[in-house]
């Protein structure tokens, strides 16, 4: 089963209130598009944590092995896999260089766990460039952050 996962994260302040927006799309054998959306806000987070959470939540929603194309405007997320940073971090016991720990280790490990059983590829798209699903994810992420900021959640 082929699934496309679109995701974006937002933070109002870094750290500050933030949120993610995720869209899962699947076209069945009859050509019918199935779609699910996920969004959530957090009171004290960073943009990078929200970028990771959006992908994690989308992958964790899958109930059987899938071929997943992750589309994100986050170089932080896409380059970690496409530039093989994640492999180097794991080899160095989650360290960058000789001493600095990788930021967000908890979420990187959760993401790797969520990827198990799936074939996942990552594609970067330019943010705020008119990509319809990326714009929808951005709107969900910022709306969730704003709801936290305004005390509505």
Image (spheres, grey):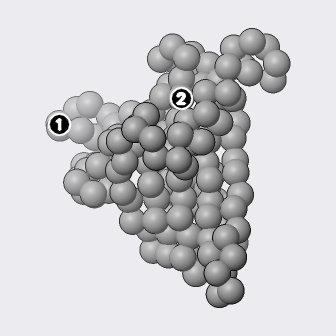
Kindly identify which residue carries mark 2.
Answer: 10
Location of residue 60 by image quarter: bottom right
Which residue is rendered at x = 72% and y = 20% of the image?
A: 148
Q: In which quarter of the image is the C terminus?
A: top right
2 vs 1, front mark: 2
Which residue is rendered at x = 62% and y = 71% of the image?
A: 26
Location of residue 101 by image quarter: top left
Q: Distance between the residues labelled 2 and 1?
A: 30 Å
SS label for mark 1: loop
Which residue is rendered at x = 22% and y = 54% of the image?
A: 83
Q: Quadrant of the N terminus?
A: bottom right
Seen from this angle, which residue lies furthest front? 130
Residue 46 percent location from the top left of the image: 50, 25
Would residue 104 be seen by someone viewing this image from the given angle?
A: no
What's the mark number on residue 98? 1
Rendered view: 128 above or below 110: above
Would residue 63 be seen by someone viewing this image from the given angle?
A: yes
SS label for mark 2: strand
Seen from this angle, which residue lies furthest bottom? 29
Rendered view: 23 above or below 100: below
Residues 63 and 12: in front is 12
Residue 110 percent location from the top left of the image: 54, 52
Mark 1 or mark 2, which is nearer the start of the sequence?
2
Residues 45 and 5: in front is 5
Residue 17 percent location from the top left of the image: 62, 19
Rendered view: 22 above or below 152: below
Location of residue 44 by image quarter: top right
Seen from this angle, which residue lies furthest left? 98
Which residue is rendered at x = 53% and y = 47% of the image?
A: 132
Rendered view: 20 above or below 47: below
């Amino acid at each position: 089963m082929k699934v496309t996962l679109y995701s974006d994260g937002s933070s109002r302040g870094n750290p500050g209130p933030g949120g993610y927006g995720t869209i899962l799309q699947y076209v069945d054998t009859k050509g019918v598009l199935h779609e699910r959306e996920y969004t959530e806000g957090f009171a004290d987070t960073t943009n990078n944590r929200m970028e990771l959470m959006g992908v994690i939540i989308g992958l964790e929603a899958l109930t059987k092995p899938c071929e997943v194309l992750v589309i994100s405007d986050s170089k932080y997320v896409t380059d970690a896999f496409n530039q093989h940073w994640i492999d180097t971090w794991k080899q160095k016991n989650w360290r960058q260089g000789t001493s600095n720990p990788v930021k967000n280790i908890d979420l990187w490990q959760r993401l790797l766990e969520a990827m198990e059983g799936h074939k996942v590829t990552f594609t970067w798209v330019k943010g705020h460039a008119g990509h319809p699903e990326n714009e929808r994810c951005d709107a969900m992420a910022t709306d969730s952050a704003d709801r936290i900021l305004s005390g509505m959640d």
